[in-house]
Amino acid sequence: MSDEFNQIAKFEDPGLPEHVHRKTDTDPKAADLAERQVAILFILSALGTVLAIYAYIFIKDDVFFFIPIMGDTNAHQLFLGLGMAISLLFIGLGLVHWAKMLMPDTEVIAKRHEFRSPDEDRADFHQTIKEQAAAAGLGRRSLIKRTLGLALGFSALTPLVLLRDLGPLPGKDLEKTSWKRGTRLVTDPGDRPIRPEDLEIGAVAQVLPELEPGSTRHLSDIAKDAVLLIRLRPSEFQLDAERLSWTYDGIIAFSKICSHMGCAVALYEQQTKHLLCPCHQSTFDVTRAAKVIFGPSARPLPQLSITVDADGYLVAQNPFNEPVGPSYWERPS
Amino acid sequence: MKKVERIGVNVAGYVDDRTGAAKWLRKNLTKVFPDHWSFMLGEIVLYSFIILLLSGTFLTFWFDPSQREVVYDGSYEPLQDIKMSAAYASALHISFDVRGGLLMRQIHHWAALIFMAGMIAHLMRVFFTGAFRKPREANWLIGVGLVTLGIVEGFLGYSLPDDLLSGTGIRIAEAIIQALPVVGSYLAFFAFGGAFPGEAFIPRIFTVHVLLLPAIFLALITIHLMLVWYQKHTQYPGPGRTEKNVVGYPLMPIYMAKAGGFFFIVFGVTAFLGAVASINPIWLYGPYNPGQVTAGSQPDFYMGWLDGLVRMAPPLETAAFGYTISWNILIPGLIIPGILFTLMALYPFIESWMTGDKREHHLLERPRNNPNRTAIGAMSLSFILVVLINGGNDLIATHFSLTINQIMWFTRIGVIVIPPMVFVITKRICLSLQRADREKVLHGRETGRLVMLPHGEFVEVHEELSAAEKFTLTQHEQPMALQVPNSDANGVLNPQGLKGKLRARLSQAHVEQVSAPSASEAKELESGHH
């Protein structure tokens, strides 16, 4: 701070203002009244506990009644909670009221000292550290220091190795789905195979690959296999010849797992023919092979090529030709 | 001696016989703490942590952290006979078949929200009043660590019930792990014990949620409070309050009663919320299925800003040489939050470098008296607020009849344009408030009373401030900007280089102030009067 600055007279600190006594300090009647108020608060708390226990034991948990704003409310849960709230809240209010009304409210001044020790003590301390370092030979014996560093660094590898069995290596797992050439599309839920005529124009259906006999479906299968079928008028597509050949009679199939972060792309807007992921609003244009037209996703939804089998049921013409779901480092581009 | 006193003395004697701590205890039981409503924000956090421990323990008695498939057979009819994980089934069991279970679940969730909101409010109080300055940098760092861990702990907590909403959240977390360059898919497979979702994740995060993180919280909170105790609490400036003292009330009995009472009040309010305000009704979402999703998927508010960042990211992905980098996930999901939290953690050191101020500070600053810091804080808040708005863009769109695209573009542009604007405006507001303070000290408070003078002139009566008010409004420091020497002793030009220039420039911005009125000025004005 410059000298010039200090020469200007600042407003002086008038010191702590004089203490003003409360009514409860001067008037014994007011103090007695405050005591009674505190007692009432504590009694209210006790009544709250009684209400909570009463609700727990005697109010059936299937009793509902209507409260504006809250709607149909479960009486058991409501009164148990209110009882608990009252019992806790009024203990608190009582204690605070007691402290504010009846305990001394004179402000106390305590001293504060700078944390920095006197120079002498610091010098002594520094000296001790130097001596200790010298005694340990840290400055001189660099071989010890380096090998210790090596040993400590290496010892951290054990826990890393121990965590190896947390899971298998990904291998090619992220690239594969259960879809194979000729796998039937079955409804989810229901597992019924579907024919093209089951879908009206404008309709959407979620399908999964038909289970092979004896196998079970895990959630991790659904996380890759879920497919969305959408039927448009064939004239509405704006696809190249190859992609058009992947559709069947206006029915187009996309992976339902968002190419951004893997949520289910479940919102279909019939008017605009847009698919929207409710997690981060990536928007895909169904007529243009799920091209991303808005939002953070960088890739279209993978398209599944479909056709019908001899019995007229929809089947996969080929497996997905790219990994479904979110990106990862070794994802082939 | 009264009976109470006798018991007290006996207990004190018993303790001292075994510890010799009489002197230490006497000193600490009468320790003085300053009083201010904003000092209770941290208390709220502490108490909601205790509530979380109590209600969480209750929940563990019935919760089954397992992703084994079961068929639901409980009293909630709509989900009868539906396949689900044991975790979800037991969460339903707690909600419908354990008396008080739903109440405890809701208390636990509300307490978690209060815990996070309290931490953020407490952090803002500490930031805007400069309480993080030397010697309290360590406590600031612990606090930033607690906020970070709090976000993780909260996310893991609401992920445990394995409902459709929280499962979707886990899916997103998995995608972030998977997006990490080189090791992503490996880490994801390790974390989930194989392909997503597997059956390992819920049991694993359960241990982290109920054991590992709470233990770290407990340790960090203990150190945090011990440091507050040892370094003594900061206080707001005012008459009689200096850097060398603490003015307030003794721990015993005032704060025992007030703080103890406040714990019960926080618990009571949380219980009230748990009783009347439904939160996270998992039974409406159904069990998790990766092929399904709920519309309007929203994380809890402390995750919302992250989600908003991810939503507004441009669709950038690099695919080359057979490898893929998802910038659209890495930048909003890891890089920006990483930079934000690092800057927040380092702020005390950055500020002390900018100002060259290495002194101890125990008197808080009024936010207006440090315009630059206040503006930085407001700017950061506006950034978080804009991305948080985008995190709720779907709900805002339906509630206000807007399109998601409008909100997304507003926030995409806003996140770049609004924070700098907020910085400038906040700084100007602070300086204007300083000017208003100056006006008040020198010319008194406007009373709104108009008086007609004998010659017909109307004047408004100004009321002089009390000495205490004048002192409070003028006691703050008016630091000078750091000077960078143009050349050093050997004639080398600009010896500190670019870094020195930058520092001088920042320091100059930091000291921008309206000069506080001094007593000399006031005297001059007075003598100039009629």
Image (cartoon, rainbow, N blue to C red):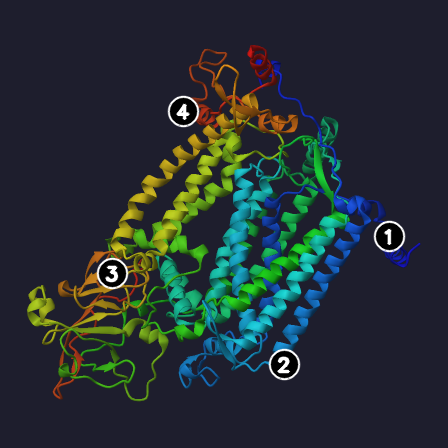
Callout in the foreground (3, 1): 1
Callout in the foreground (4, 3): 4
The span from disc 3 to disc 1 (Cα, nearest Å) is 72 Å
x and y percentages locating residue B509 in the rendered image = 44, 26
Q: Report whether mark 4 lies on the same chain as mark 3.
A: no
Label 4: state its secondary structure: helix
The span from disc 4 to disc 3 (Cα, nearest Å) is 45 Å
Question: Which label was assigned to residue A332?
Answer: 3
Amino acid type, mark 1: Asp
Q: Residues within 10 Å of mark 2 (few under 14, many from 20)?
A: few
Confirm whether residue B207 shows in the render: no
Which chain letter matches label 1? B
In the picture, the quarter occupied by the C terminus of chain A is bottom left
Question: Which label was assigned to residue B16?
Answer: 1
Identify the residue position indicated by label 2 in the image. Answer: A57
Indicate the quadrant where residue A255 lies. bottom left
x and y percentages locating residue B41 in the rendered image = 58, 49
Question: Does A147 sit above or below residue B180?
Answer: above
Q: Report whether mark 1 lies on the same chain as mark 4.
A: yes
- First reached walking from the N terminus: tag 2 or tag 3: 2
- Viewer-proximal residue among A255 and B497: A255
Callout in the foreground (1, 4): 1
Label 1: state its secondary structure: helix
Identify the residue position indicated by label 4 in the image. Answer: B498
Q: Report whether mark 3 lies on the same chain as mark 1.
A: no
Q: Does residue A100 appear left or right of residue B24 in this picture?
A: left
